[in-house]
Image: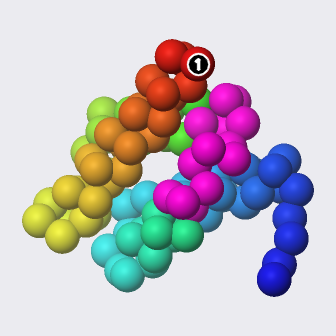
Amino acid sequence: MIQISEEFFGSLAICAVRYCQGRMTYMPEWVREIVRPHLRELTDKDLAVLINDCEDQSRRNSYGDEKIDKPGWIKWEQELKAERERRSKH
């Protein structure tokens, strides 16, 4: 079992996701699969940064492969926004 503080986890998640943006490898999905179950543990600021990065990726259309990578990134952005919405209701 590896333990990491929420602060460091958020920073690590942001760095890992940013590294993956635009890449056409298995890594983007792998990183999203690692972070996804821990979205509730991210700070509001970390969540906002990840959403902003997704929106920037969309503006630049830098998803990687249109058929392989883009659907995963679009789903990821929707999941992040759903988490933000969930928090706003509590």
| Residue 74 in view here | yes
Residue 40 colored magenta?
A: yes
Image quadrant of residue 22?
A: bottom left
Please state which of residues 9 and 86 is positioned toward the viewer in this rendering.
86
Q: Quadrant of the C terminus?
A: top right
Q: Give the percent coordinates (x, y) of residue 19.
A: 55, 64
Extreme top residue here? 89
At 54% across and 41% down in the image, what residue appears? 50
Question: Which residues make up the magenta segment?
Answer: 35-47
At 45% across and 40% down in the image, what residue appears? 80
At 69% across and 30% down in the image, what residue appears? 45
How does the figure colour the protein chain or chains? rainbow
Circle 1 residue: 90
Please state which of residues 4 and 89 is positioned toward the viewer in this rendering.
89
Q: Give the percent coordinates (x, y) of residue 42.
A: 68, 44
Of helix, strand and loop, which mostly describes the magenta segment?
helix
The residue type indicated by label 1 comes to His
Residue 57 colored magenta?
A: no
